Image (cartoon, rainbow, N blue to C red):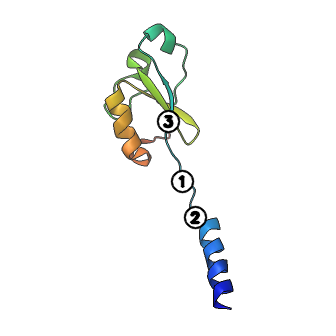
Amino acid sequence: MKIYVIAILGVCAFSCAKEKYSVKHVVKQTSPSELRNIKVFNAQDPICQMKTAEFLKDTAIYKGRVYGFCSDYCKKEFKKNPKNYATSEK
């Protein structure tokens, strides 16, 4: 009987777990012309506040939105704790 109770509680715990989002790599290219047509969710880099339209160097997907970054450093900082930097722009 205890095994069934433990099994049911385990299934409930896993099914009720909060959805976890991860940051996925989209594109990293150095040519500005190749990045020109990429539409990003944020107008400014969420880390350093540079305008993504002018300084876009890298992108990542978080919660279904493509975020743009001016550098690999900013993207790495975003990936450490994306919920602190994710915005409700647009």
Residue that appears at 58% across and 64% down: 17
- Distance CA(mark 2)–CA(mark 1): 9 Å
Residue type at mark 1 is: Lys
Confirm or deny contact between disc 3 and disc 1 (CB under 8 A).
Answer: no
Q: Position of residue 9 (x, y in %)?
A: 62, 79
Element under label 1? loop
Residue that appears at 45% across and 42% down: 86
Residue type at mark 3 is: Glu
- Distance CA(mark 3)–CA(mark 1): 21 Å
Q: Which comes before the other along the chain, label 2 or label 3?
A: 2
Could you tell me which quadrant the N terminus lies in?
bottom right
Q: Position of residue 65 (x, y in %)?
A: 55, 35
Q: Which residue is mark 1?
A: 20
Q: Which residue is mark 3?
A: 89
Confirm or deny contact between disc 2 and disc 1 (CB under 8 A).
Answer: yes
Q: Which residue is mark 2?
A: 17
Q: Which comes before the other along the chain, label 3 or label 1?
A: 1
- Toward which corner of the image does residue 57 lie, by quadrant? top left
Residue furthest toward the bottom?
Answer: 1
Q: Nearer the viewer, residue 27 or 33?
A: 27
Element under label 2? loop
